[in-house]
Image (cartoon, rainbow, N blue to C red):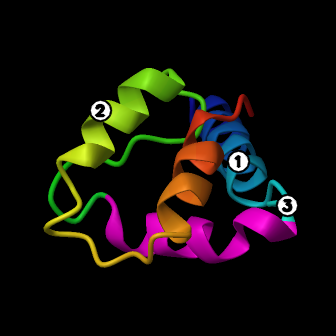
Amino acid sequence: MRVRWALAMAFVLTACGEHHTTPIPEKYAEVAEIHHASCGNCHVRVEPGERTRAQFEHALSRHHTRVKLTDTQWPILIDYLAQTP
């Protein structure tokens, strides 16, 4: 029983580790850091590719008053989130 549990935990940790080490293209590095550090503080963080571009544009339009991003960072964040991993 312990062997199965250890193997299951090793699989889960390995799978989680691979998700977090996926290289992020340089053009998204700044907004990806903001996304990982800030998004999820008020709600469950939505990861890139989990919604359509239109859904992200609609949702992020409500965040303009709360999230302090520059006018150039907003479209990059939408591009980052709308990409398919």
Query: Which disc, if any, is residue 8?
Result: none
Q: How many marks?
A: 3
Q: Position of residue 52 (x, y in %)?
A: 50, 21
Give the mark nearest the N terminus, 1 or 3. Answer: 1
Identified by mark 1, the residue type is: His
Query: Which disc, if any, is residue 25?
Result: 3
Q: CA distance from mark 2 to mark 3?
A: 24 Å
Q: Secondary structure at mark 1?
A: helix
**Overall secondary structure of the magenta section:** helix
| Label 1 environment density (alpha carbons within 10 Å; few <14, some 14–19, many ≥20) | few
In the depicted view, which residue is nearer to us: 60 or 85? Answer: 60
The residue drawn where x is 26% and y is 46% is: 61
Q: Secondary structure at mark 3?
A: loop
Q: Position of residue 15 (x, y in %)?
A: 71, 41
Q: Which residue is mark 1?
A: 19
In the depicted view, which residue is nearer to us: 28 or 8? Answer: 28
Find out whether residue 28 is within the magenta segment.
yes
Location of residue 41 (image quadrant)? bottom left
Give the mark nearest the N terminus, 2 or 3. Answer: 3
Q: Secondary structure at mark 2?
A: helix
Circle nearer the viewer, 1 or 3: 3
Location of residue 64 (image quadrant)? bottom left
Identified by mark 3, the residue type is: Pro
Q: Which residue is mark 2?
A: 58
Identified by mark 2, the residue type is: His
- Can I make out residue 76 in this image? yes
- Against 10, is 30 above or below? below
Q: Quadrant of the image for the C terminus?
A: top right
Identify the magenta region: 26-39
